[in-house]
Every structure is written in C-alpha cells, then in structure tokens.
Image (cartoon, rainbow, N blue to C red):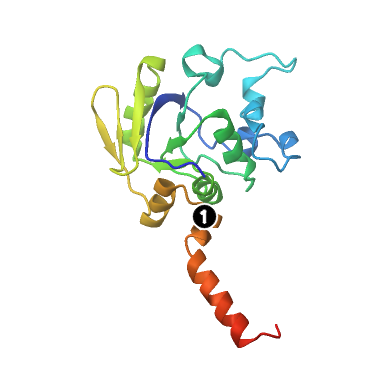
C-alpha cells in the first residue's frame, strides 16, 4: 500500500449529502475483483449521460477538477452497501483524501485499508474548505498527516483528529498484510518452536 504522508492537490467540491457507495461506484462495475480500472466507473451515473458522453456539469468533468486528488463532501459520505470497490474506484481515479463532517463506518474503515485518508472536520471547517475547493485548480489544499492539519491556499489551517494506529498504518503504507509482515520474525520463531515441539504435525 502506498504511504500517505503529505498530499498537496486540487480539491473537488462535492455539495451532496449522503453520497452512497452505489453513487461512488454503480453496481454494474462490481463484477471485477481487480483493484485497478475502476476509476472510469467512479460516479459514473453522474459523470456520464445515457449516451455515454460526459456530463459537463459534474464537478470531476470540469477542467479544473479532472486531476483532483481530494474530495470535499457534505455529511455522511460512503453510506449504503459495504462494497470495497468504492475506495478502489476513488484510488484508481487518483483520489487520496476525502474530507467530510462524517462517514459511514464500513467505508471509513475500508479507506484506511486502501491508502485513502478520510478526514472528519467540524461543519464550520468544512464550509471554509468547501470555499477553498470552489476556487478551482488555482487553490490547492495540503493535507499533512503527521501534523494532522489541512492547509488552505490563503494560509488557513484546519486541525483534525485521527486514531493513532490508523495514522501509523497510513504513514508507513501498512495494510492488514503489511501489519502481519511486521511480525514476520516472531511468526517464524513461533513456527520453528512449534515444529520442534510437535514434529509429527
């Protein structure tokens, strides 16, 4: 998993409450178990018209936000079904951070396991960040995980809280397998001891 330390990038404003996982990646894209290639389906029902052409009114189709790495969204982002394809699609598109006032629990947990930082901020801070995001490509946000702060283009700073264990995992690029591999020497020692104690096993 790619480490998340400091990210400076364009933030796309998504003024939608209750963005659910079916909106993030519609059900027709769930046939694959590959984590790549899902970016094209991200927000597909909003990004594309019925004839397959792009909807110019959708934020990620606007020139300023085509390479956005951050989404600033309204309350309850990632609600709905528990599909892990949702963070896969965000990551494949290039989104590394989502900022909201709240997240659905399963989506929130899945983000950390896939190298995406979900940041919870107070409503008044979200309003400031949304204003920053609406300025387009000229106004980038910097998300500093070590310092737990978001820096705006005018020098404003928003602090955020994060669980220390999750912070450690993101800073070091550790998913569940990576965490297990940190204990590789202890696992090897246990297996050798067990093999000696029970050679017939």
Q: Is residue 100 above or below residue 13?
A: below
Above-or-below relation of 147 to 155: below
Nearest the viewer among 146 and 177 is 177
Residue 114 position in % (x across, y down)? 54, 45
Which residue is found at the position 57% from the left and 77% from the top? Answer: 192
Q: Residue furthest left?
A: 155
Crowding at dot 1, Cα within 10 Å, few <14 / some 14-19 / many 20+, comes out as some
Tag 1 secondary structure: helix
What residue is at 52 percent from the left and 18 percent from the top?
66
Q: Nearer the viewer, residue 165 or 61?
A: 165
Residue 93: percent from left, percent from top? 57, 29
Report the side of 32 relative to 75 (left or right): right
* Residue 162 x, y percent position in the rendering: 36, 50
In the picture, measured across the screen, residue 147 lies left or right of residue 108, that is: left
Examine the image and state in which quarter residue 197 appears.
bottom right
Q: Which residue is mark 1?
A: 178
Q: Quadrant of the C terminus?
A: bottom right
User: Is residue 91 or residue 30 the one in the foreground?
Assistant: 91
Please state the total of marks drawn on the protein image. Answer: 1
Instruction: Name the residue rendered at 36%, 23% in the picture.
Output: 140
Residue 5 lies left or right of residue 157; in this view the side is right
Does residue 147 sit above or below 64 in this rendering? below
Give the percent coordinates (x, y) of residue 55: 62, 15
């Amino acid at each position: 998993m790619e480490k998340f330390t400091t990210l400076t990038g364009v933030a796309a404003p998504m003024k939608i409450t209750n963005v659910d996982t079916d909106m993030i990646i519609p059900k027709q894209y769930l046939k694959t178990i590959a984590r790549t290639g899902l970016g094209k389906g991200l927000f597909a029902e909003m990004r594309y018209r019925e004839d397959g052409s792009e909807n110019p009114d959708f934020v990620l189709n606007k020139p300023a936000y085509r390479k956005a790495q951050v989404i600033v969204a309204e309350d309850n982002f990632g609600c709905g079904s528990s599909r892990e394809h949702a963070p896969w699609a965000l990551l494949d598109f290039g989104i590394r951070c989502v900022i909201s006032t709240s997240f659905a629990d399963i989506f929130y947990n899945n983000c950390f396991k896939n190298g995406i930082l979900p940041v919870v901020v107070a409503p008044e801070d979200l309003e400031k960040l949304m204003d920053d995001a609406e300025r387009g490509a000229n106004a980038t946000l910097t998300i500093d995980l070590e310092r737990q702060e978001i820096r705006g283009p005018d020098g404003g700073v928003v602090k955020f809280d994060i669980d220390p264990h999750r912070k450690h995992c993101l800073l070091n690029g550790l998913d569940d397998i990576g965490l297990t591999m940190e204990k590789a020497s202890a696992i090897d020692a246990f297996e050798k001891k067990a093999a000696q104690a029970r050679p017939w096993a």
